[in-house]
């Protein structure tokens, strides 16, 4: 192990874990690999994190903590836009963490704070209680799907869709293949969020609760 190493701490371990995940992928993270990254034996890490599951929880917490909160005085729809864009910003910084981030239970304070902020914004939109819950799930599904598409696009470079074998047998696919293969992810993501907000506004206008 290297003698030129920083003092070991929980924060240093989490930061190194994020570095390993960003570089090598989540599936390559192990306590042994992390120890090598830090210049320590793997057993030394267990004084600061109990196991790999606890380490992953801490990594997810750190990723969510990178998101800046919206101004609570902003209108509800601006807070939704902010929450979505911050999720995308952090997801694109740590694409190997995305699936863990969007499937993690709300055990971490930063995750709970984010969920609470989105629910509060939707509650202020005028939706009924049941519609707030449905809209929250729709928000998660729409943003998660958009980000999964974006972060995996680079790994699925199979050539122009219209040139793939058998595509000419599918009339609509052959016609729209080139357009489907071209995507401005900035525009697509913003369009997704704006569509969600318009749906929420429409539902809020028809189910608005009495003051």
Image (spheres, helix red, strand yellow):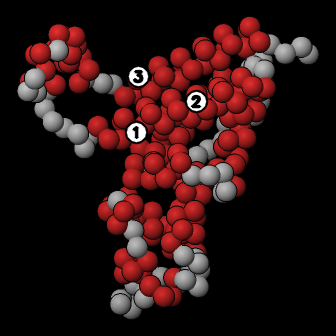
Residue at the (17%, 10%) spot, across then down:
171
Picture quarter with the N terminus: bottom left
Q: Earlier in the sequence, mark 2 or mark 3?
A: 2
Give 183 or 141, whichever is nearer the viewer: 141
Q: Closer to the observer: label 3 or label 1?
A: 1
Seen at 45% across and 68% down, the residue is 17
In the rendered image, which residue does mark 2 sit on? 139
Q: Which residue is mark 1?
A: 148
Query: Which residue is rendered at x = 40% and y = 27% of the image?
Result: 186
Q: Residues within 10 Å of mark 1 (few under 14, many from 20)?
A: some
Horizontal and vertical percent position of residue 182: 25, 23
Task: Pinpoint residue 167: horizontal percent, then vertical percent.
Answer: 13, 20
How many C-alpha atoms fall within 10 Å of the one at disc 2: few (<14), some, or many (≥20)?
A: many
Q: Nearer the viewer, residue 31 or 76?
A: 31
The span from disc 1 to disc 2 (Cα, nearest Å) is 14 Å
Q: Secondary structure at mark 2?
A: helix
Can see residue 75? no
Say left or right for 193 vs 208. left
Residue at 37% x, 28% y is 185
Which quarter of the picture shows residue 4? bottom left
Q: Quadrant of residue 158?
A: top left
Q: Could you tell whether 110 is left or right of 11 in the image? A: right
Horizontal and vertical percent position of residue 109? 70, 55
- Residue that label 3 marks: 187
Q: Is residue 11 left or right of residue 157?
A: right
Residue at the extreme right:
211
Secondary element at tag 3: helix
């Amino acid at each position: 192990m290297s003698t030129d190493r920083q003092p070991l701490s929980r924060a240093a371990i989490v930061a190194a874990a994020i570095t390993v995940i960003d570089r090598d992928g989540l599936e390559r993270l192990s306590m042994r690999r992390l120890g090598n990254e830090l210049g320590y034996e793997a057993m030394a890490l267990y004084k600061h994190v109990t196991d790999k599951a606890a380490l992953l929880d801490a990594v997810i917490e750190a990723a969510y903590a990178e998101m800046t909160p919206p101004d609570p005085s902003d209108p509800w729809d601006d807070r939704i836009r902010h929450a979505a864009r911050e999720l995308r910003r952090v997801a694109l910084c740590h694409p190997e963490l995305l699936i863990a981030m969007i499937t993690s239970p709300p055990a971490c304070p930063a995750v709970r704070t984010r969920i609470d902020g989105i629910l509060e914004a939707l509650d202020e939109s005028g939706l009924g209680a049941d519609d707030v819950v449905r809209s929250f799930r729709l928000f998660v599904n729409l943003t998660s799907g958009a980000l999964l598409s974006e972060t995996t696009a680079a790994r699925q470079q199979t050539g122009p869709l219209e040139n793939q074998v058998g595509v000419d047998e599918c009339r609509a696919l052959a016609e729209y293949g080139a357009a489907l293969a071209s995507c401005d992810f900035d525009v697509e993501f913003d369009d997704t969020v704006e569509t969600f907000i318009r749906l929420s506004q429409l539902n809020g206008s028809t189910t608005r609760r009495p003051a």
